[in-house]
Structures are given as structure tokens and as C-alpha cells.
Amino acid sequence: MALSGLFPGPAEAAVFAAAILVLNATPGVDFLLTLSRTLQGGARAGIAAAAGINAGCVVHALAAASGLAALLALNPGAFRLIQWAGAAYLAWLGIGMLLQAWRAGSVAAAQPASAVVRPWQADFRTGLLTNVLNPKVAFFFLAFLPQFVPVGTPSQTGSFLLLGAWFVLQSLLFSLALVALAARLARVGAGGSLRRALGAVGGILFVALALRLLRERPSAA
């Protein structure tokens, strides 16, 4: 099977790449998590979180290609279950970030600020769960990818998978560029005050995103 028949034409491909860039550059859960973990835990933490986020995108792409996302949209009970789990996890992360920022502020005068170091597996798991437990991402893949499947493609599933792979690769490259930028900011003097401020703002935003997620409906896909 020729791969050329599975990809969109040049004009559609350019639109596809531009749409992914806009999506990646729009501050949201994935953007904020990658940025905050890099500033708080260093480049290794940011890379691990970004890898987990994009692993979650792989899961959603495979679900869209196999039709699982469509089944989720048609099953309100399953949707609500994942929705509540995702919202609870985001709220838990947000409250944790707020508490961490508060504790860091209370001891800032007593000791110099340092990066929050934890096993990379923990950051990978955090990135993975924030993405997989967000049904909005599943619906995005279900609504977005089919628009770029070429008419008359020899395999719609093959096109889905290749477009999903393209999405994940481009998103991963963007995430790594964001990690590099955030790590540089930290090196040139971001310091503990910026980490605390980002933790506080990020915590509030994560709680707000959790509440927003609870208002979503399957029909929003």
C-alpha cells in the first residue's frame, strides 16, 4: 500500500501542521504542566511530563482509529466516569501545586529555593494521566483527524494512524522546545519566586480547568 494515498495533499497538510502548532501553543493543561514541571523540577522533569502527555495522545489516537472514542461519545455513563476521574485528578494536582507554593513561600526566608526533584516516572505518570483522563482530548482526535483523511484513501484506519503519529511527533517537538525555553529561563534567574508564582497560578488554573471539564457534555465533540 502506497503511503502517499494515506496522507492529505500539500495544502491540507500545511493546514494540519498549522492547526497542531496553534493547539500546542495555546496555554492549557498540557502546556502548563510541561512549563511548571520544567521550572520546578528542571529539564528532566519537563521532558518526562512531556513524554507522558504525548504517550496519552498516542492512546487517544489509537482509540479514535479503532472507534473507541466514538463509543465513548455514545455512552454518557462512561463519559461521565472518565470526566469525573479527570476532573478529580486535575483538582488534586491543582491543590497540590497551591500547597507546594504556600509551603515554599513560608520557608523561603529560611533556606534558598531549589528545584523540586522527584523520580522521572512520577512526572511521566502525571503527564500521561492528565491527558488520558481528559475526554475532551479523545473527542478532539475524533473530530479533528477525520477532516484530513484523504478522500478515496485505501485505508481510513491507516490514514488515522499516520495522522495521529504526525500529531504526536509534532506535539512532542513543540513540548521539547518549550522545555528548553523554560529551562533557560530558570538558568538565567527565574529563581524560587517564579517557581512559587507559577505554582500558585498553575494550581488555580488546574482547579478552574477541573471545574470547566465537569461542564462538558459528550455532544461537545
Image: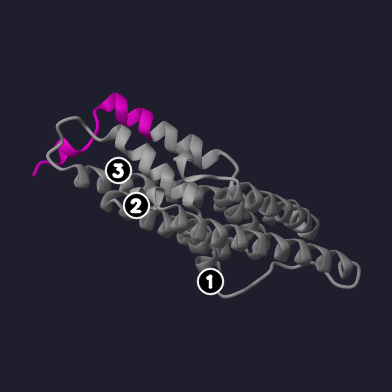
Magenta stretch encompasses residue 9: yes
Q: How many marks?
A: 3
Dot 3: within a 10 Å radius of its alpha carbon, few (fewer than 14), some, or many (20 or more) residues?
A: many
Question: What separation in Å lies between label 2 and label 3 (alpha carbons)?
Answer: 21 Å
From mark 3 to mark 1, how far is it between C-alphas? 29 Å
**Residue 68 sits in quarter:** bottom left
Q: Residues within 10 Å of mark 1 (few under 14, many from 20)?
A: some
What residue is shown at x 66% (from left), y 60% (from top)?
Answer: 91
Q: Secondary structure at mark 1?
A: helix
Q: With respect to residue 79, does 17 lie above or below?
A: above
Whether the magenta-drawn stretch holds residue 127 is answered as no
Can you give x and y, in whole percent of width and height, for residue 163 in the image? 30, 43
Residue 210 located left or right of residue 151: right
Q: Which residue is mark 3?
A: 163
- SS for dot 3: helix
Q: Secondary structure at mark 2?
A: helix
Going 27% across and 27% down the picture, which residue do you hit?
10
Is there CB contact under 8 Å for labels 1 and 2?
Answer: no
> What residue is disc 2 on?
71
Q: Horizontal placement of 193 versus 71: left or right?
A: right
Q: Which residues, given as a range, are shown in magenta?
A: 1-16
Mark 1 or mark 2, earlier in chain: 2
